[in-house]
Amino acid sequence: MMNRRQLLATMASTTLLATAREGFAQGAPTFRIAALNPITGSGAAYGAGMQKMILAAVEEVNAAGGAGGRKIEVVAEDTQSQPQAGVLAAKKLIEIDKVQGLIGIWSSGVALATIPLANDANILFMCTSGAPEITNPQVNSKGLVYRFNTTGDGYGRAFAEACAREGFKRPATMAFNNASGIGIVDGFRKAWEKNGGKVVEAVVYEPNQPSYRSELQKVLAAKPDVIVTGSYLPDTTIILREWFQTGDTQKWMLPGQAANPDLIKAIGPEASEGLFVVNSISNEMSTAYAKFDAAYRKAMNQPGTSNIYAAMAWDMVIVLALAMEAAGPNANVAAINAKIREIANPPGKQVSSFAEGKEALKAGKVNYDGASSAVDFNQAGDVLPDFDLSVISKGVITRKNIIKI
């Protein structure tokens, strides 16, 4: 018997597959990818938008005649933001649906659990996850993994810069016990200590607890002037409620994944007043971002700035499609993979959409300037977006400044 979550996931998969097939000529060749997103669990605030932007970008590619002579087809599954569920979904997508790419993986835990499956199947893997080890040579042994977000180390450097700008001297850290949470605070510690600073306390906590009071008290006992977290929305909500009840007044600096309007609604404007938020930001001045933003507003009735991960998911599809076009008709995954950096990185004519890039490829090389970043991959398969430092005041998250690292 299926539980309700499994039934909903199955229904979603069927619906998305049918949508992607609309308009296909009888017998037309296709390239099948998986939208493997966190529709439920800790990433649920972002997963639906990511999934819809994968579909929207695929629609744009197919409307332009497809890529490399093929239409792109989408099958969707929910990772539930959990490694075990992600593995089960990935196995189904690879073994039954025969996808040639896993797209839109959000959680580092899910990414690290499913990359070996992608490697074994020799298919592409595109994620937004932050754990530094995701793109190290041992994990990304076949060079099939591309991260459209910064690493935890990159996040940590942005946190360190933000703390320095705000004049903090005695930071402490609290991290969710997974690769992403620990990666952020470890990156922060390394960057902070490199500049001569000291982290006065570091606590790692387990997920799914009804209270984090003991871990919080340990951090507060060190008398920090700011607490930097590698956290998610559910655990951050509990921790901040318990902190507010103590009457302590130090500042907090949270990753964007943990601080959004849902957090303010959950803990109230008084408890959220003065919270700092560090987040990677989209390539907001680019034409690609304008296209993504219009699609996101249409699909979600929200601005694109509300979901950086959806912009990354959009770019995943465009990068894949341009690489398919550059590789030529019916190219295999290896040939497509060999073209990804070529179409994403300089040199080449700067393009902002698949249709523009498809036309430009007829004359030579292209350089895709994306919605989420410039999408220039380093040797490991990572990009380096910009960040912003925002502050919550009177129930509103307001950008304070831009951080470039």
Image (tube, rainbow, N blue to C red):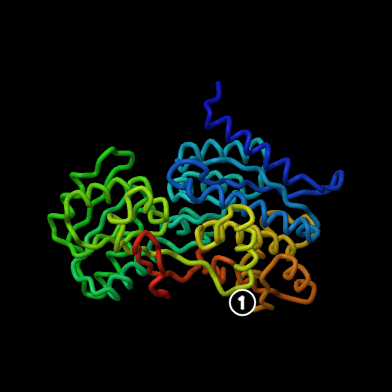
Q: Position of residue 222 (x, y in %)?
A: 13, 58
Q: Secondary structure at mark 1?
A: loop
Q: Residue furthest top?
A: 1
Q: Residue furthest right?
A: 26
Q: How many marks?
A: 1
Image quadrant for the C terminus? bottom left
Residue placed at 26% from the left, 48% from the top?
A: 241
Up the image or down, 336 lies above or below 15; here it is below
Image quadrant for the N terminus? top right
Q: Position of residue 328 (x, y in %)?
A: 77, 62
> Where is residue 76, by image quadrant?
top right
10 Å crowding of disc 1: few (<14), some (14-19), many (20+): some
> Where is residue 345, by image quadrant?
bottom right
Up the image or down, 387 lies above or below 13; here it is below
Residue placed at 32% from the left, 71% from the top?
A: 162
Up the image or down, 65 lies above or below 358; here it is above
5 relative to 275 in the view: left or right: right
Q: Position of residue 75 (x, y in %)?
A: 66, 43
> What residue is pinned by disc 1?
346
In front of the other: 143 or 8: 8
Q: Position of residue 174 (x, y in %)?
A: 26, 54
Looking at the rendered structure, the kind of residue marked 1 is Pro
28 relative to 213 in the view: left or right: right
Quick check: can you spot residue 373?
Answer: yes
Quick check: can you spot residue 405?
Answer: no
